[in-house]
Amino acid sequence: MCSILVGFWFGQQIAKYNETKKANERQEKELDEKLDELRKVNKMWDEYRKEVEKQKEAGEERIWWDEFKLKREQEQEQEREQKQKREQEQKREIQQIKNKKRSEEVWVYVLNKIN
């Protein structure tokens, strides 16, 4: 009887440990995502400061952070669209190659059956 209770208690402890471990992993993943986002913003801020310095040296009107951020986001969106287009083109090319290979295999099969 005592060994059953000890086994049950031990099982509960393992379950609690596993739940805590999963919760910690989820929290760590969320924190990593937030850290990545902060790094992106920090990098963008550094680019903004460099752009402002260039404009000061050239005597141009200062670009504001919101404009700069919007411009970068638009550039990133264009890059994503171009990447998607390239991937779609590659998929089309691969499909064309597969179709060509399949048609060649059919012709070989037909010719072998004829002979």
Image (tube, rainbow, N blue to C red):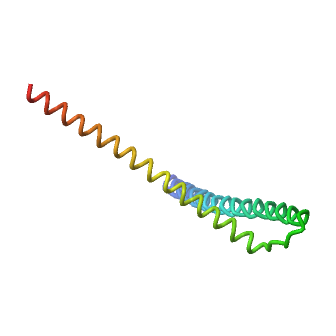
Q: Residue at x 54, y 60 (%)?
A: 81
In this picture, is 4 found above or below 115? below
Point out residue 31 in the picture as x, y percentages from the top left corner. 68, 62
Corner quadrant of residue 79: bottom right
Outermost residue, front direction?
A: 59
Frontmost residue, 3 versus 36? 36
Q: Is residue 54 left or right of residue 7?
A: right
Q: Is residue 5 left or right of residue 61?
A: left
Q: Is residue 30 left or right of residue 92?
A: right
Outermost residue, top direction?
A: 115
Corner quadrant of residue 115: top left
Q: Residue at x 86, y 61 (%)?
A: 54
Frontmost residue, 22 versus 67? 67
Q: Is residue 86 left or right of residue 72?
A: left
In this picture, is 92 found above or below 115? below
Point out residue 60 in the picture as x, y percentages from the top left corner. 86, 69
Query: How many numbered badges does the structure rendering display?
Result: 0
Point out residue 72 in the picture as x, y percentages from the top left corner. 69, 65
Point out residue 109 in the picture as x, y percentages from the top left corner. 16, 32
